[in-house]
Amino acid sequence: MPGGTAAVERVFREEYGRLIASLVRRFGDIDIAEEAAGEALVAALEKWPESGVPPNPGGWLTITAGNRAIDRIRREKQRDAKHQAAFMHYDDTPHEPTGPVEDDRLRLLFTCCHPALAPEARIALTLRLLGGLTVPEIAQAFLVPETTMAQRITRAKKKIAAAKVPYRVPEGADLPERLGGVLAVLFLVFNEGYLATGDGDPVRAELTGEAVRLTRVLRRLLPEEPEVAGLLGLLLLIEARREARVRNGQLVPLGEQDRVGWHRGLIAEGHDLVRECLAINRPGRYQILAAINAVHTDAPNASDTDWSQVVALYDQLTRLDPSPIVALNRAVAVAELDGPKVALTLIDRLPLTGYHAWHVARADMLRRLGRTAEAKDSYDAAIAATQNSAERAYLSRKRGELV
Amino acid sequence: MTHYLLTVHGPAEMDEFGNYGSKEEMEEAFATTGAFNEKLHADGYWVFAGGLQSASTATVVDGQGETPVVTDGPYLETKEVIGGFWVIDAPDLDVALKLAAEGSKACRGKVEVRPFDGLA
């Protein structure tokens, strides 16, 4: 039924980021915004099942929540003059119901991803305030107790208020650097969903989906930024392969995936974004990663992959980001061009003995070189270094196949 | 506007050049810090600032009992102590962090930025 509880909750979740962002701009306080949004949800749950979902549910929630917040501020005004003074400070932008709603979300995203906040708090706040995920959902996603996650979020919100982290999109020279922090948070959220760290669900579609959704919002808000287009393209091209990535509880590596199971719509959209980035010609990390994934998704079969193109793109990425992790991924591509022996030499040089993907890559090269005993040890090290059940299952199978 | 305390952290033990390495470097740091102070005044952020004597000149007083207890030395025995500070009045944390970065470069030390809960 159109106005049922499930419908109300779905609308609320979809509208949450917009609603909170507009309330934060108006009242300058995250707690007030969250509380008012919660009260608006209660009101909607009472009203909508009878009267149906209003034609503009977001507008209805914004007006209702705004009224509740004003009521609360009036109540507090009588007993806490100092608290009130804090709100007044921010209350300098007039409320415009049809105004810069999208800009509000962008501002809040930059606040949530502020470099003065701890990295894990940035991710949690972004999911809470812009994604509308509940604290228990976020705690579960990152495998920490609910109380720990609640404290993390509370502490970050307190710092935002006390140290006055601004609600503002950075301007000029500050934007690229701060935008990098926002993109990093979105990519981390996606990655945690795509290869979950813990031993629960190996892939968490709600996290990958949320990261894609927020990146789409960012893309609409900053259409001129090629790195935003690059990140969206990258996420779409990886997300397109999600369904084909786990079979019978085992991770299926790219080369062994059934490409019929890839999502063609997402791939087409990702390829369009990569082409757009190429035309702008201001390459960056996410654009290059997107281009690498475009090469993979362009190949009808794994054997059709243009590996020289992949290696060339990794060379370009190395010039921007000479990190050992980029070098590891490059070495895996080099193996397809120059063979596992060359690749193994490159891999062995990298200071990544604590990183499970390093052991995985090493095990694979040793296996291909017929160095079975060493390969087994490497598979053992890789299995010990990951908690992800699907990856463990895949690695155990590969190890078991060695004779 | 919010008041922020910017504290400069440095080694507790100072040599004759205040850990700047040489006389020239020390004088240069004093000059750049002086210029930074003037900028804070000119741009309206300045509230108060000062450099401190070494931590070994500190005395701790506990007046909570019947008679005050006086102890030589700093309250915390650590390798890094506060060497100086600024109190600034800035519109938000982004401005405070920018100023802290300039101050850090000028005085050649790490700077901690902490908001005041209020000023008496």
Image (cartoon, coloured by chain):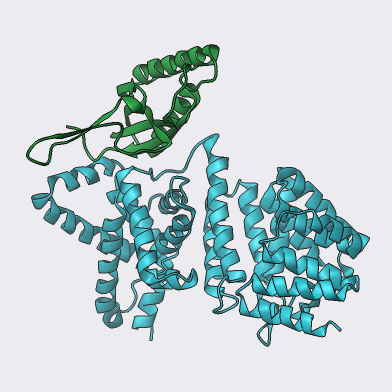
Chain colours: A cyan, B green
Quarter of the rendering occupied by the N terminus of chain A: bottom left
- Residue B35 vs A373, above or below: the answer is above
Residue B93 x %, y %: 38, 38
- Residue A244 vs B83, above or below: the answer is below
Question: A370 or A236, which is in the foreground?
Answer: A370
Q: Decide if residue B85 is in sight here.
A: no
Write the residue at 84% across / 52% down. A312
Residue A338 x %, y %: 92, 60
Question: A340 or A289, which is in the foreground?
Answer: A340
Q: How many marks?
A: 0
User: Would residue A124 be found to the left or right of residue A305 on screen?
Assistant: left
Name the residue at the right extreme.
Answer: A338
Q: Decide if residue A85 is in sight here.
A: yes
Task: Determine which quarter of the picture holds residue B64.
Answer: top left
Task: Determine which quarter of the picture holds residue A93.
Answer: top left
- Residue B19 vs A259, above or below: the answer is above
Task: Determine which quarter of the picture holds residue A264.
Answer: bottom right
Quarter of the rendering occupied by the C terminus of chain A: bottom right
User: Would residue A181 be found to the left or right of residue B48 on screen?
Assistant: right
- Residue A151 vs B112, above or below: the answer is below
User: Would residue B34 be found to the left or right of residue A73 on screen?
Assistant: right
Residue A186 x %, y %: 55, 58
Write the residue at 13% across / 45% down. A81
Question: A337 or A173, which is in the foreground?
Answer: A337
Name the residue at the left extreme.
Answer: B66
Residue A391 x %, y %: 67, 76
Write the residue at 28% across / 40% down. A92
Write the residue at 40% across / 60% down. A129
